[in-house]
Amino acid sequence: MTGARSREGEDESGPQMPQKKHFRSRAHSNVLNANDFWFPARPQDVPWGEYFPQRASGERAKTFPSQLVLGIEIRPKLVEYVQKRALALRHEAAQATAADAADAATYENVWALHNNAMRFMPNFFEKGQLSKIFICFPDPHFKRKNHRKRIISQPLLAEFGYTLSAGGHLYAITDVAELMEWMVGHLTASPLFERLSRDELRADPCVPLLIHTDEGQKVQRNNGNMYISVFRKRADPAAPRDEPPLLGNDVAAIAAADAGYAPEAGGERRGMTW
């Protein structure tokens, strides 16, 4: 594309692909005090048409072309980057010829929202509305006094379970060993969820995508650890069940290896201090 770039990241040809180096952000945010967001009074008031303006006309993404994909992030710079990237990808798709676009992703069903998912998820999503929730490299909040800020907790699992459909999946990936132990412990203890087996993970097309996020690629460049676990919303959380086994990080590391990444010798010592 040619033309003079404007301050908004566009030129005469349309939106330009953003460079991540221009969207640096602090790693930590105080989620407990982050309340000054707009949020709808009820899920029916969410302006989906603003987020997905072409949702009614054959929108496509590479892996789930018929599904809407919404990222919720508390750091505004990261949201701005994803939004501009989505707009640039949409513009590129629109410029493709009809023949080239026949099997291409149009990215009309992908968007990001600046908000606090730990506070306002029930305002955005109805009961059972979501088929998948992805928790990718969340802040580990190492200090014990900050553990209540972690995105996996018993109160929040109730909200995740409420918004997930029966059989829906919750995906978790991190490079921090202690945090994965925390997340797996809470999810295993919850009657709302059951952990997917290794065979089920291998058959899930979403699992390999987890290691190819920007943060996942950063971990790979640094030869760090990655741990993956996926839990399914139980069809009947009130139904009796045997006490599930609390599987260790070796299982979560194997899941990442099956997805396509395992650290070289020495990498197993990483991911402990973030």
Image: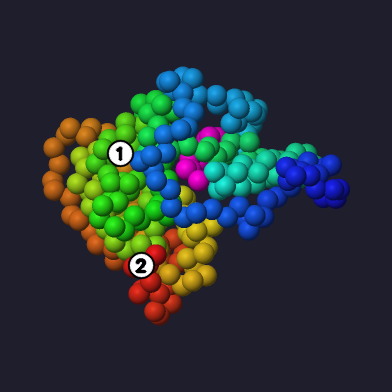
Q: Residue furthest right?
A: 3
Q: Nearer the viewer, mark 2 or mark 1?
A: 2
Way the structure is coloured: rainbow
Write down the region rendered in magenta.
Answer: 66-75
Q: Is residue 58 left or right of residue 208?
A: right
User: What is the number of callouts on the image?
Assistant: 2
Report if residue 171 lies within the magenta region: no
Residue plotted at (29% across, 61% down): 178
Residue plotted at (84% across, 42% down): 12
Residue plotted at (43% across, 48% down): 29
Give the label on residue 156, or none. Answer: 1
Residue 113 pos. (x, y %):
53, 37
Residue 269 pos. (x, y %):
35, 74
Residue plotted at (20% across, 56% down): 246
Q: Nearer the viewer, residue 218 or 76?
A: 76
Query: Does any portion of residue 257 appear in the rendered image?
Result: yes
Q: Is residue 214 left or right of residue 158?
A: right
Residue type, mark 2 in image: Thr
Q: Is residue 227 left or right of residue 51?
A: left
Against 264, residue 71 (above or below) is above
Q: Nearer the viewer, residue 188 or 241?
A: 188
Residue 145 pos. (x, y %):
26, 52
Give the label on residue 273, or none. Answer: 2
Query: Does any portion of residue 62 appear in the rendered image?
Result: no
Q: Is residue 76 left or right of residue 225?
A: right
Q: CA distance from mark 2 to mark 1?
A: 25 Å
Residue 26 pos. (x, y %):
50, 54
Quarter where residue 121 is shown: top left
Category of crowding for the residue at label 1, using alpha-carbon neighbours closer than 10 angstroms: few (below 14), some (14–19), many (at least 20) = some
Report if residue 68 lies within the magenta region: yes
